[in-house]
Image (cartoon, rainbow, N blue to C red):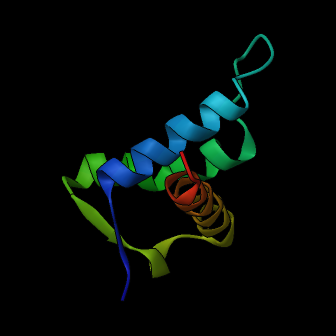
């Protein structure tokens, strides 16, 4: 079973916020950041340091997988 740390989820939220800043008068988060915000908040409330990836809904899984792919691509690019 694959686990995600609270730091990884926070980094993914920050990544998505940098890619698509909050919009409108209500400063709505983009879909990806918003989908990760709920499990992140639950982890804070419950005092959890990690969460099984299986507990994420489809939207949150997609957002974290896209973030991890971008992170891996960035780390493997030649300098």
Q: Quarter holding the N terminus? A: bottom left
Q: Is residue 45 left or right of residue 66?
A: left
Where residue 61 sits in the image (x, y, percent)?
60, 69
Q: Residue at x 52, y 42 (%)?
A: 13
Q: Which residue occupies the extreme front position in the image?
A: 79
Q: Which residue occupies the extreme bottom position in the image?
A: 1
Res 21 quadrant in image: top right
Q: Is residue 22 left or right of residue 13?
A: right
Task: Please tell me which residue lies in front, 69 or 21.
Answer: 69
Task: Please tell me which residue lies in front, 8 or 55.
Answer: 8
Q: Residue at x 43, y 43 (%)?
A: 11
Where residue 75 sits in the image (x, y, percent)?
49, 54
Q: Which residue occupies the extreme right position in the image?
A: 24
Task: Please tell me which residue lies in front, 17 or 70.
Answer: 70
Q: Residue at x 77, y 20 (%)?
A: 23
Q: Is residue 71 left or right of residue 6?
A: right
Res 27 quadrant in image: top right
Residue 73 drawn above or below residue 34? below
Residue 16 drawn above or below residue 59? above
């Amino acid at each position: 079973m694959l686990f995600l740390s609270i730091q990884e989820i926070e980094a993914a939220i920050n990544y998505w916020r940098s890619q698509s800043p909050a919009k409108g008068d209500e400063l709505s988060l983009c879909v990806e950041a918003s989908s990760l915000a709920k499990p992140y908040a639950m982890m804070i409330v419950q005092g959890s340091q990690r969460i099984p990836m299986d507990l994420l809904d489809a939207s949150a899984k997609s957002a974290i997988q896209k973030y991890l792919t971008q992170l891996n691509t960035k780390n493997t690019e030649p300098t």
